[in-house]
């Protein structure tokens, strides 16, 4: 059976459908017995869903924030 650490290492490939049948079965077996890893995978799925809904490209408000932070650092230094 996979350890929790091994499951985390395989989690992205599992969610992307990139594992072999044997690896998928090992992940599913572990998830059936480990509530912490089930919660982790559920959170990963939610994170992927949120990321997919984000607009592509750069976000201007983040660029403006980064510039303000850089300016604040220059003014302090």
Image: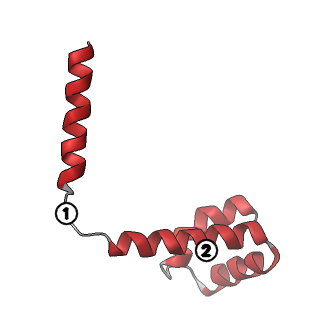
Up the image or down, 64 lies above or below 68; here it is below
Query: Which residue is outermost to the bottom?
Result: 21
Q: Secondary structure at mark 2?
A: helix
Direction from residue 41 to residue 64 in the image, left or right: left
Q: Nearer the viewer, residue 65 or 33?
A: 65
Up the image or down, 60 lies above or below 68; here it is below
The image shows residue 13 at horizontal and vertical percentages of: 52, 73
The quarter of the image holding the C terminus is top left
The image shows residue 48 at horizontal and vertical percentages of: 45, 72
Direction from residue 71 to residue 27 in the image, left or right: right
Q: Residue at x 76, y 75 (%)?
A: 30
Q: Which mark is residue 42?
A: 2
Of the numbered discs 2 and 1, the one sitting upstream in the chain is: 2
Q: Which mark is residue 28?
A: none
Q: Secondary structure at mark 1?
A: loop
The quarter of the image holding the N terminus is bottom right
Direction from residue 50 to residue 38 in the image, left or right: right
Q: Residues within 10 Å of mark 2 (few under 14, many from 20)?
A: few
Q: Are marks 2 and 1 in contact (CB under 8 Å)?
A: no
Q: Residue at x 82, y 76 (%)?
A: 33
Q: Residues within 10 Å of mark 1 (few under 14, many from 20)?
A: few
The image shows residue 20 at horizontal and vertical percentages of: 58, 82
**Residue matched to label 1:** 57
Q: Residue at x 21, y 34 (%)?
A: 68
Q: Nearer the viewer, residue 46 or 29?
A: 46
């Amino acid at each position: 059976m996979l350890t929790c650490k091994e499951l985390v290492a395989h989690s992205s490939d599992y969610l992307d459908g990139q594992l072999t049948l044997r690896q998928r079965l090992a992940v599913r077996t572990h998830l059936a017995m480990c509530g912490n890893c089930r919660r982790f995978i559920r959170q990963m799925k939610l994170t992927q869903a949120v990321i997919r809904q984000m607009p592509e490209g750069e976000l201007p408000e983040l660029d403006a924030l980064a510039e303000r932070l850089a300016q604040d650092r220059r003014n302090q230094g």
